[in-house]
Amino acid sequence: MKYILPTYCLLFLSFTLQAQANYEEEKVPKYTLPELLVAENGIKINTPAKWTNIRRQEVLSLFEEHVYGKVPEFTYQTSYSVKELPSTGLPKNAVAREVEVRIFNSKDTIRINILVFLPAESQHPAPLFIGYNFHGNQTVHANPHISVTSNYVINSSKLGISGNRVDESSRGIRTGRWPVDQILKRGYGLATIHCGDIDPDFDDGFENGIHSLLDNNQAGQWPTISAWAWGLSQAMDYLQLDPKIDANAVAVIGHSRLGKAALWAGAIDKRFALVISNNSGCGGAALSKRKYGETVKRINTSFPHWFSTNFKAYDDNENTLPLDQHMLIALMAPRPVYVASAEDDRWADPKGEYLSIYHAGAVFDLFGKGRFTNPQSPQVNSPRIDGNLGYHIRTDGHDLTLYDWEKYLDFADIHLKK
Ligand code: GTR
């Protein structure tokens, strides 16, 4: 039997835990990062071919084993149905549609609803951003034709969401995080999915969401962050079929827990041409071994369903981890990757997020695709770009803002525009 705590208890708990965390740089323990460029048999990885053919797979397997878990083998079928929506409130000639992806087998069926916005007709298929939202597609734009999710959503006292369900009143409540007009006007499409369509975000013993299609003995092997990442690949399967979308120019983006999912999706699925982590923190871009802000123990305790059972062996034991998150960023190489932090979001360890992309640079450098040379993160609101690496730390706290999006669009202009 699972107990679900009321929102005010969870909020209180989260404030208390965040207050107790270490925020003093002097108290960061001494740590050594595992070697990125030495293979398990000791050989030096000094060419792109050696990275691609030897070391990349080793690093990927380490993350599957120790952090995110492996996608279980199971059979399923997929079907799509597309519904064009009236383009209410969108820039002239822009298109909105909903794509229902049915994923089914003899055990169960789940339905993922991809909301797709496309820019005004152009001669070329559009590059596109794809990312999960926390509370349903209807929250990202006020268009009254967007379906309101009936799935489990995360509660939010700030947004007035309780009882883990939303209704009509939630339309457009998250437009601040999704500047649809700006994205479309700059020539990009946007696809978004409610994360609860793939797996509801609570510790349900891996019964709900996509887990309902698995055999019982596979339950527990497929944690939520990994299931969300897999869901993004399912959406990518559809994007490849749509002639209006340039499937070779799809950026995957995610904020916070959904940033962790975006990074893992980018690691396991090379079809994502650009990967963006917004304030993804512990288990995302931040180095675990620094134990700054949210720690491995903290995250495994608060969210036991996010990571693999093996990850719990590193609770308060980060120094024995055979990997760290810089190796996750390296898995994107040579594809472009952008990591963003926020100054007041100390829980997500901005410095640890920067250090990850800084150390991952060794692999990008092998490909001649850039490397940050300065171990100090840049000043606030001054993005640092080198080749296929991008980073900024902005003022204010944990959020996905217009400032962040403007920087991602600028970076995408360099890498995704033909
Ligand atoms: C926090 C959690 C973070 C981050 C965040 C979010 O409670 O500790 O790891 O994922 O939630 O998703 O907003």
Image (cartoon, rainbow, N blue to C red):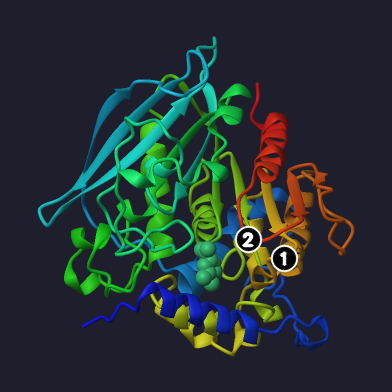
Instruction: Report the residue marked by disc 2.
Output: 398
Residue 155 seen from this side: yes
Q: Amino acid at mark 1?
A: Asp
Q: Counting residues from the N terminus, which is met first, the one under dot 1 or under dot 2? A: 1
Q: Is 360 rendered above or below residue 282?
A: above
Residue 390: image location, x then y, percent: 75, 47
Few, some or many C-alpha atoms within 10 Å of disc 1 (few <14, some 14-19, many ≥20)?
A: some
Q: Which of these two is toward me, 274 or 51?
A: 274
Residue 62 seen from this side: no
Location of residue 377 (image quadrant): bottom right
In the rendered image, the quadrant that contains the C terminus is: top right
Q: Which of these two is toward me, 265 or 270?
A: 265
Residue at figure coordinates x 49%, y 52% from the top left = 265
Image position of 137 (left or right of 252): left
Few, some or many C-alpha atoms within 10 Å of disc 2 (few <14, some 14-19, many ≥20)?
A: some
Residue at figure coordinates x 70%, y 43% from the top left = 403
Image position of 24 (left or right of 223): right
Location of residue 115 (image quadrant): top left
**1 and 2 marks in contact (CB < 8 Å):** yes
Quick one: SS at disc 2?
loop
Residue 82: image location, x then y, percent: 28, 27
Image position of 411 (left or right of 258): right
Instruction: Report the residue marked by disc 1.
Output: 344
Residue 391: image location, x then y, percent: 75, 51
